[in-house]
Amino acid sequence: MDAIKFTRPSAWLTGMADGVPVSTRILLSFQFLVNLSVFGSLPLLAAFLDLERHLDAGSVASVLTVNLLASRLLPLVLGASTDRFSSRVLATLGLICRAAGFVGLALTPSFTGLLTWAFLSGLGAALYETTAYSIFGSLDVAVRPKVFALNNLALNLGALIGPAVLIVVPNTDRTLPFLVSGMIFAVLALVAPWISGRRASNPAAVHPLRGLMIAFGDRRFRRLCWALVPFWTVYTQIYVFVPLTFSNGASGYNGVRPFYITNALVGIATASLGMGWFQRTTWRSMMTIGHAAMCCCFAIAALLFDHGWGAGASLVILIAVAVVFTFGESLILPASNIALADLTTDGNAGSYFGASAISWAIGGMLGNFIGSAAAGWTVHTLGWVVFMGISVIGLLAFWRWQK
């Protein structure tokens, strides 16, 4: 009798990564660990500032915005620098800053201190993420779609395991998730200098200032950035409006975690099942379908709240919103990376990916203040309707672009 052959569990993932350089696979594993740490605590920051530090809506939005602007505006300079300097050094510095920032957010009671540590955490994100995406963007054009899809899969795996593991953390110590995330970043910072990366400067890289001028002088780049502002405005609500709305429910501080677990599960399913489709279709089609899903997501939430389901079925609303939201997000995020990579040439990938952060900075800043204010409105349905309208603007922008 022939022996029954069992496929190793890792064989499926190895097959998906076929053709991807080993150094890139290592970086993808880092992406998983970084997102595991981030989603274990950062989505709870708004609720933590509200319930533990007793900040008002404006102060909560200010802390979140300082973190956001540091992580999304600093890449304007840092992005071009990644084309010239060692990726190991920049990634390590970024992880150290993130470790210090998360620990500081957990232990600092003053508003000024929270702003300082939020800035340092954002600086760390700018250093690490810009370095990682500039490496991905400089890969051969044939392997880019697969790498960005695998990156989306790795990020969603981290976003699943982070909240799932820390869901057992008791509500009595609300600082513990941030301390655990800080320790994970510290360990990664110790390992980062030993991973494969660019050791020397890229001889084809242009001067940082010239790199930014090239990027912002590209009409297609400017158009893409403006079209993505509505998406980043509504995407920010998974850190603002969603936790502020649901953390005061019967389940308390951890009541919002099912959203992030569902978000990660749907993201993993979309990234794995849609791998072949991602490589065959155009990024414009992915953008249009993704924004349509975003509109449906907020319409569903508004409908459920409008029928008085808010308090009695918060878990149902969370999961329904998370499923549709994540489907759209899982199409838009890799599509935006593919679109950016298509605009780059040898030696300026970091400039383009760094400069594109201005789109997230503008949209995220709007989202922080709109979401913080909307969470305090008496009728939450109005908030969902507002975000649906913003999603419609993004849909119209890319629908016209596709035509």
Image (spheres, rainbow, N blue to C red):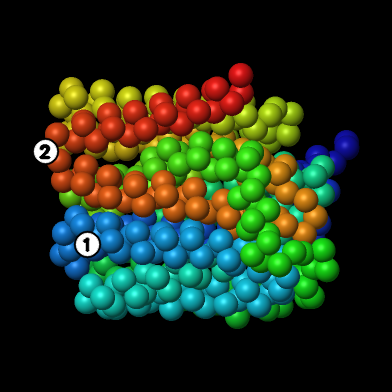
Outermost left residue: 378
Query: Residue at 38% of width from left, 40% of height from top?
Result: 234
99 with respect to 148 (left or right):
left
Comparing labels 1 and 2, the label whose residue is closer to the camera? 1
Where does residue 31 sit, x and y in percent of width and height?
60, 59
> Between 40 and 73, which is closer to the camera in this rendering?
73
C-alpha separation, residue under disc 1 versus residue under disc 2: 20 Å
Numbered disc 2: secondary structure: loop
The amino acid marked with disc number 1 is: Ser
Q: Is residue 220 above or below residue 40?
A: above
Could you tell me if residue 394 is visible in this image? yes
The amino acid marked with disc number 2 is: Thr
Say which residue label 2 marks: 378
Where does residue 65 sit, x and y in percent of width and height?
35, 59
Query: Residue at 20% of width from left, 57% of height from top?
Result: 58
Say which residue label 1 marks: 59
Could you tell me if residue 269 is visible in this image? no
Circle 2 crowding by C-alpha within 10 Å: few under 14, some 14–19, many from 20:
few
Where does residue 22 sit, x and y in percent of width and height?
79, 60
Which numbered disc, 1 or 2, marks the residue that appears first in the sequence? 1
